[in-house]
Image (cartoon, rainbow, N blue to C red):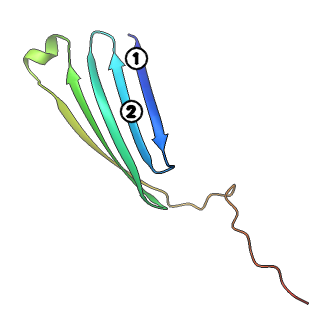
Amino acid sequence: MFFLQIKANLRGSLDVGLNYRHQESWGIRLGVQATKRTYIGYVYEMPTSAISKVSNQTHELALRFFILKDKNNKEEKPAKIK
């Protein structure tokens, strides 16, 4: 099976994308970094295979929570004056 996904991140907080599964489905995805530690996403897929006779479409909601601190993203601390 061939799968293609194109996703763009706009302004560091908004994701927009398209996906295609060969002879299976196509879809769109949207996501937003709601807060520094919370991401909310939505995916819509339309089947194009034989299953489309039974199921018209899917809607998915994604929630991502960042619970650990990022070691690579060090915040600058103010310099101490002696």
| 36 to the left or right of 60 | right
Q: Residue at x 68, y 58 (%)?
A: 71
Q: Residue at x 44, y 26 (%)?
A: 6
Q: Quadrant of residue 7?
A: top left
Q: Is residue 40 above or below residue 48?
A: below
SS class, disc 1: strand
Instruction: Decide: few, some or many residues near mark 2? Use Cα within 10 Å; few <14, some 14-19, many ≥20.
Output: some
> Which mark, by number, is residue 42?
none
SS class, disc 2: strand
Q: Residue at x 62, y 57 (%)?
A: 70
- For disc 1, the marked residue is 3
- For disc 2, the marked residue is 17
| 36 to the left or right of 24 | right
The single residue placed furthest to the right in the displayed view is 82
The residue type indicated by label 2 comes to Gly
Q: Position of residue 27 (x, y in %)?
A: 28, 27
Query: Which residue is more in the foreground, 12 or 37?
Result: 12
* Figure quadrant of the N terminus: top left
* Figure quadrant of the C terminus: bottom right
Q: Is residue 44 above or below residue 46?
A: below
The single residue placed furthest to the front in the displayed view is 11
Q: Quadrant of residue 38?
A: bottom left
Query: In whole angstroms, how far apart are the C-alphas of marks 2 and 1?
Result: 13 Å
The residue type indicated by label 1 comes to Phe
Q: Position of residue 24 (x, y in %)?
A: 26, 14
Q: Position of residue 26 (x, y in %)?
A: 28, 21
| 59 to the left or right of 38 | left
Front of the two marks 2 and 1: 2
| 82 to the left or right of 18 | right
